[in-house]
Amino acid sequence: MSKSYDKEKYIQQQKEKINEYQKIVADTLENYTENPELIEDYLSFAGKFHNYSFRNRMLIQKQNPNAVFVGGYEKFQELG
């Protein structure tokens, strides 16, 4: 029974993360609509992360507008 509780808790946490990301994307798009000059900044930033989806590029930019490299923990460990 505790496994189903853990599974339900995990599902709820994932839904909350998705809702948070959707809000970030919606807020970012609204900013671009209100301030079209931000589109140039976004396009310049997005060019560094062309292998990522539009949504992921927006999330990366929102978290760190000065990012030049994105990788998971294992990638950073691999690079030293």
Image (cartoon, rainbow, N blue to C red):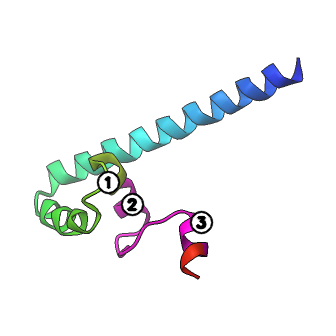
Q: Nearer the viewer, mark 1 or mark 2?
A: 1
Residue indicated by mark 3: 73
Q: Residue at x 26, y 69 (%)?
A: 48
Q: Quick one: quadrant of the N terminus? A: top right
Disc assigned to residue 60:
2
- Is 32 part of what is drawn in magenta? no
In this view, the residue in front, 49 or 78, is 78
Look at label 3 and name its amino acid: Tyr
- x, y percent for residue 50: 24, 59
The image shows a total of numbered marks equal to 3
Mark positioned earlier in the residue sequence (1 or 3): 1
Q: Is residue 58 above or below residue 13?
A: below
Point out residue 28 in the picture as x, y percentages from the top left corner: 29, 51
Q: Quadrant of the C terminus?
A: bottom right
Q: Position of residue 73 (x, y in %)?
A: 59, 65
Q: Nearer the viewer, residue 44 or 31?
A: 44
Looking at marks 1 and 2 on the same chain, the residue that comes earlier in the sequence is marked by: 1
Judging from the image, what secondary structure is the residue with disc 2 in?
helix
The magenta stretch spans which residues?
59-77
Query: Which numbered mark, 2 or 3, is in the foreground of this view?
Result: 3
Query: Could you tell me which secondary element the residue under label 1 belongs to?
Result: loop
Residue under pointer 1: 52
